[in-house]
Image (tube, rainbow, N blue to C red):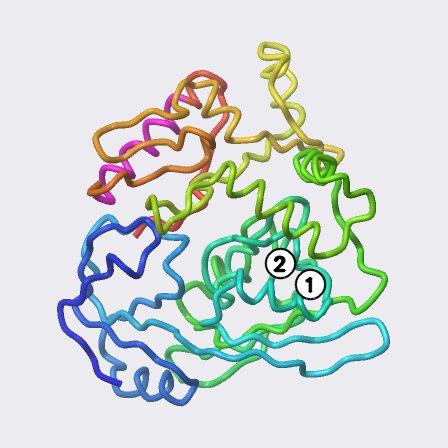
Amino acid sequence: MEILQNFSLKKHNTFGIEAKAQEFVAVHSVDELQHVLKENTSKKKFILGGGSNMLLTKDIDALVIHVDLKGKKITKEDENHVWVESQAGENWHEFVLWTIYQNFGGLENMSLIPGNVGTTPVQNIGAYGTEIKDTFDSCEAMEISTQKMRTFNHAECNFGYRESIFKQEVKDQFIITSVIFKLTKKNHIIKTSYGDIIAELTTQNITEPTLKDVSNAVIAIRRSKLPDPKELGNSGSFFKNPIVLKTDFEPIHAKFPEMKFYEISPTEVKVPAGWLIEQAGFKGKRFGDAGIHKNQALVLVNYGNATGQEILAVSKAIQQTVFEKFGIHIEAEVNVI
């Protein structure tokens, strides 16, 4: 377990941005993590998972700790459910496929989301009508300052839309080392209410989809809309879908009756950010090596040698234009470093 100096992070972020870590170390166990934290208490630290939800706009003048803990196991089960624990460094999509292979239900709609398991509760990631909070049981995390372990149960995580306690009250205080999910063994709740999934299943003449069918449909949809980070640097959805009070939305909708929206509560609607960005004229646009993907306006891309600053500038131009046109603020989902 060697601490490396002036280490390139280009292969450790899905945008493929060239940025240097002052120091870098990969840890493969809770003991190694504890040791690194204890031996480097005075140093500034930066915790790195799969590098899938961040935009590096500068070099990291800190000790970058890459959490690379591997392993998954069943911790308990009953007649209807199974509790599966995954270490933080497991690739999320590979873990989802593993659960489907075992016929464990609950994660299939989140197939092909980039990143590692350990960061999924931080963002409360989600796709196609499912979020982490739907199957999350608990997670183990190490407090950075004391190196003590703590279990966070579902209620303690304060999950919201792309939100959790790890982005708010205890931000930068804990490192998640493992996550336990409660999944179904039978009587799976198959979620196909999203139009894209129904359409994809229909083209395959599937009327009673299995977990694998739903996963395959989601994978096909994502591949048709979203670029593979291995081929074109990106971080998936760059922006959150804005949640707007109905009282604020009504005059906007009167002005733009074609605007899509989803009612999420008696007082709020969610507006697809991709639609707003496309209507603002940004879909498929390119500014040097930074741009907006041609098939999905939510995704900002690095066509080769874009800097984080250049991608950030494009994102700010999008936010400003969308607000000027529609009066709606769109927030970045990606962490800007």
Single out the residue that lies furthest toward the top: 255
In the picture shown, does residue 38 fall above or below 21?
below
* Tag shown at residue 297: none
In the picture, measured across the screen, residue 303 lies left or right of residue 240, that is left
Residue named by callout 2:
132
Q: Report helix, strand or loop for mark 1.
A: loop
Measured in 3D between alpha carbons, the distance from the residue under mark 2 to the one under mark 1, in whole angstroms, is: 6 Å
The percent position of residue 215, horizontal first and vertical second, equals: 65, 52
Q: Provide the major secondary structure of the magenta segment.
A: helix
Question: Which residue appears at 70% of the width and 75% of the height?
Answer: 83
Q: Amino acid at mark 2?
A: Ile
Which image quadrant: the N terminus?
Answer: bottom left
Pick the residue in front: 192 or 264.
Answer: 192
The percent position of residue 257, horizontal first and vertical second, equals: 63, 12
Pick the residue in front: 145 or 162.
Answer: 162
Q: Report helix, strand or loop for mark 2.
A: helix
In the picture, measured across the screen, residue 2 lies left or right of residue 218, that is left
Q: Amino acid at mark 1?
A: Thr
Residue 318 magenta-drawn?
A: yes
In the picture shown, does residue 81 fall above or below 218?
below
Question: Which residue appears at 25% of the width and 82% of the height?
Answer: 40
- Which quadrant of the figure has residue 267? top right
Pick the residue in front: 211 or 332.
Answer: 211
**Which residues lie in the magenta part?**
307-321
Residue 30 magenta-drawn?
A: no
Q: Label 2 neighbourhood size at 10 Å, few (<14), some (14-19), many (20+)?
A: many
Residue named by callout 1:
135
